[in-house]
Image: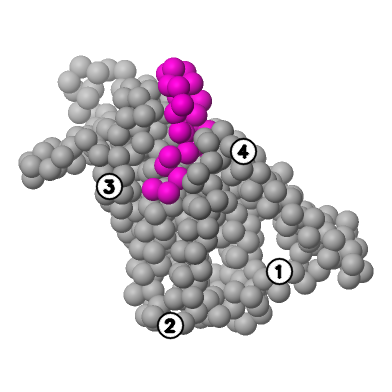
Amino acid sequence: MLNRIWIGFVLFAFAAALWQALHGDVEVFARLLTTLFDSAKTSFDIALGLVGLMSLWLGVMKVGERGGLIEALARLLAPFFRRIFPAIPPGHPASGSIAMNFSANLLGLDNAATPLGLKAMRELQEINPQKTVASDPMLMFLVLNTAGITLIPTSVIAIRQSLALKQGLVGFNAADIFLPTLLATFISFTAGLIAVARWQRINLLCRPVLVFFAGFAALLAGLYLWLGGLPPEEMARAMGALGSGTVLAIIGLFVGVAAWRGVDVYASFVEGAKDGFNVAIQIVPYLVAMLAAIALFRASGGMGWLVEGIAWGVRGLGLNTDFVPALPVGLMKTLSGSGARGLMVDVMTTYGVDSFAGRLAAIIQGSTETTFYVLAVYFGSVGITQTRYAVAGGLIADAVGLVGAILIGYAFYH
């Protein structure tokens, strides 16, 4: 699937450029070539930027592992993980790394989530019988990551607040997307989980899974009751404090417990951090391949034509098209996080941050994930070339999440 999509992006871009050149746009090939070179440089910059983060978090995780806290976290989540990751042996460290990755994603901490996810993939690869083929636990883990479940869309709220000030809005609540985003990301996560469970014939109607969903719903309700009544500025500060405070508390807990148990904390950290450079550099070829194809597709006009086609179909069905200006954000998010962020800002600038399109773009940005980026980075870090139904599962979660975000946007703001 990934191979076909990559070929499709490249060939479509060339065909579109040729069509534009034959109709008088002689600069199109130069633009695509510049885009291609820029994407290759960007890919390397991304990988290089991961070196420090990877070293930091692999070091912290090694301290937590030596101190026994990773194993304790895995035991705590064992009933749920045994259901959705039945192929992971009981007590395997991959369960703890997966739990840490999910926790970072929940708090919107991308810088922490990616290194932890890469560590989880390496540990899953240790129990993978076919080293170039994605295993069932890898597929479940990747699809749930691409579902992009997030409790606190901190960066989106900050961008909305900044744009509201520039647009002269007084008393604007930049955090009014908080609850809609929670609901949309939960829909995406659930869709991804159900899709992979059906492929892997996992029964989700069992007590551990139902307890997990009940607990998650209670967490959503608690956060809403705590944060929902705060003024926008206080809510932003509270969410930022919750995210950063949680991360620092985890690091402090890992170091404190390891020291109390007599572990050489410094040596353990350094041992774990040594692998950071190798893991980050290993993903460069995969990033270059994926981001180059995506960049060509965007620069050739493919995204614009796709959006116009969808709008034409929606109008033909006689449905409301007020959501169409925000639609490119959802379509781009599967391809590029920075590209989707730029489109979100463009929608808010063009239509207003307090418009329906502006609010919907923020909900979509905060509730979906960069599917192809995640697949390229995570699979590339362990040399997986046969991804099976990972792309299909991720796109199902994205599509359901996008439709859910649109319907939630209409329910709240239209």
Q: Which of marks 1 and 3 is nearer the N terminus?
A: 1
Q: CA–CA distance between discs 1 and 4?
A: 29 Å
Q: Are marks 1 and 4 in contact (CB under 8 Å)?
A: no
Q: Distance between the residues labelled 1 and 3?
A: 41 Å
Q: Is mark 4 on a helix, strand or loop?
A: helix
Tell me the amino acid under the disc marked 1.
Ile
Disc on res. 237: 4
Which residue, given by chain and number where applicable, does mark 2 sit on? 206
C-alpha separation, residue under disc 3 versus residue under disc 2: 31 Å
* Residue type, label 2: Cys
Residue identifier under label 1: 70
**Can residue 168 be seen by looking at this rendering?**
yes
Is label 2 in a helix, a strand or a loop?
A: loop
Packing grade of label 1 (10 A; few <14, some 14-19, many >=20) is many
**Amino acid type assigned to the residue bearing label 3 in the image:** Ala
Category of crowding for the residue at label 3, using alpha-carbon neighbours closer than 10 angstroms: few (below 14), some (14–19), many (at least 20): few
**What span is in magenta?**
155-180
Given residues 101 and 42, the one toward you in this image is: 101
Q: Is residue 336 above or below residue 131?
A: above
Q: Is label 2 in contact with label 4 (beta carbons under 8 Å)?
A: no
Q: Residue 4's spot in the image, x, y percent? A: 32, 54
Q: Is residue 212 left or right of residue 267?
A: left
| Sooner in the amino-acid sequence: mark 1 or mark 4 | 1
Which residue does the numbered mark 3 point to in the structure image? 411
Gap between marks 2 and 4 measured at Cα: 38 Å
The percent position of residue 252, horizontal first and vertical second, equals: 79, 55
* Quarter of the image where one finds residue 350: top left
